[in-house]
Image: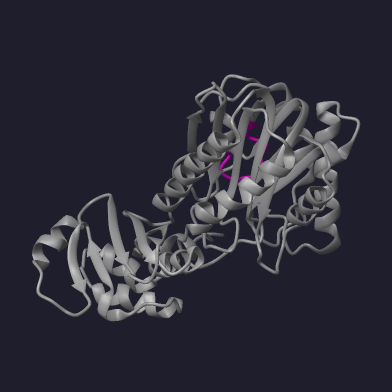
Amino acid sequence: MKLPLGFRSAGIAAGIKQSGKPDLGLITSDEPLVWAMVATENLVKAPCVTRNRARHAADHPVRALVVNAGNANCANGETGMWNNEDFAAMSAGALGLARVQEVLTASTGVIGKPLPMDALRAGLPKAVAALHEEHADDFAGAILTTDLVTKQVEATLPGGARVVGIAKGSGMIHPNMATMLAFVLTDAIVEQRPLRRSWRDVVSRTLNQVTVDGDTSPNDMAFVFASGRIPADTGELRYALGTVAEGLARKVAADGEGATTLITVSVTNGRSPEEARRAARSVAGSSLVKAAVHGRDPNWGRVLSAIGMSGVIADLDNVTVRLQGFDVFRGTSSPFDEPAVAAAMHAPEVLIEVDLAAGEDDATAWGCDLSADYVRINAEYRT
């Protein structure tokens, strides 16, 4: 996928992963970028999250982002903090940047292991030498952990500006921001304050509506960077950012660890946007709903239970539940063609629709089925 104007990227194998697969990614720009980020609310935070948040709060201009995969550099005490600083400094040096503050860092992988600084020190000059403007494919591959596929989405604005999103995420995915590592690049001209307002709203509707397993990583971050090359309407840019972020959300959910089915939960007529989002997240995150989808079991009672667990305001007599377009509950238990619904659930994506009949606000959440492979993958994660 071609990069927007003003960006270069690279992805190489630096020897961090025992598998020898690519594990060091770099994005850079010749000029300072307008940028925004949203990060995990997990009380356990990796140094990269803390450092980037400080730069975000101080409005530091940035020109580069460096990512390593295979090592989260989390829960390593002061050593982890200084290694993260050195990671940024080594990256700035390799890029010829005078200020280390212009480099953001991100790490993903196993928690509690020291960052392999020698491998990074040797790999960074190679990553800089590999930088190019052609596509984001190498970078997208270098940031993966248990992902089975790379995740890229693009959109083009009417005026010609482009938005390209790259993400990684397969496990430890749950709404509490940002549920993954996501990097969205655009060549649109936009000011920093409007971009930051738009990004937080976009994330709340998309990336923060994804759940795989109920666990939130201490390294989760979602960024947007603008190189400011092509004029763009603010509303059109916000819409494009939402389109790209939703596409990434769907790809992350579909690639959930052990997943065979993407679950899309559409909640309509909630009393408020937050209640609609909460209800959708509750259904998408329910282990019982996820297991039922895996077994192609149209067990609508589990959907209702998840709605009730969310705490939203709803009059059960007016609630409607649909599975794959079939009405399975309309205020009370009623007969439906169970074999037909079960057959319709044998699909790559299962749609669960809930009409709360409580207001006018809608929301969507994305998840995946729960299979035995999820247990196997995480039981063997470090072995």
**Count of numbered tags:** 0
Q: Position of residue 53 (x, y in %)?
A: 77, 53
Magenta region, main secondary structure: loop
Image location (x, y in percent) of residue 346: 20, 55
- In this picture the colour scheme is one colour
> Does 14 lie within the magenta span?
yes
Q: Residue furthest right?
A: 98
Q: Residue at x 87, y 38 (%)?
A: 100
Range covered by the magenta-colored residues: 11-21
Q: Residue at x 73, y 44 (%)?
A: 193
Pick the front one: 295 or 359: 359
Vertical relation: 239 (above or below) 95: below
Magenta segment includes 97: no
Q: In which quadrant of the rendered view does residue 370 lie? A: bottom left
Q: Quadrant of residue 325?
A: bottom left
Instruction: Tell me if residue 283 can be seen.
Output: yes
- The answer to whether 97 appears left or right of 204 in the picture is right
Where residue 336 appears, as percent x and y from the top left, is 10, 69
Left or right side of 119 for 262: left
> Residue at 21% of width from left, 68% of height from top?
297
Give percent across and percent down for residue 347.
23, 51
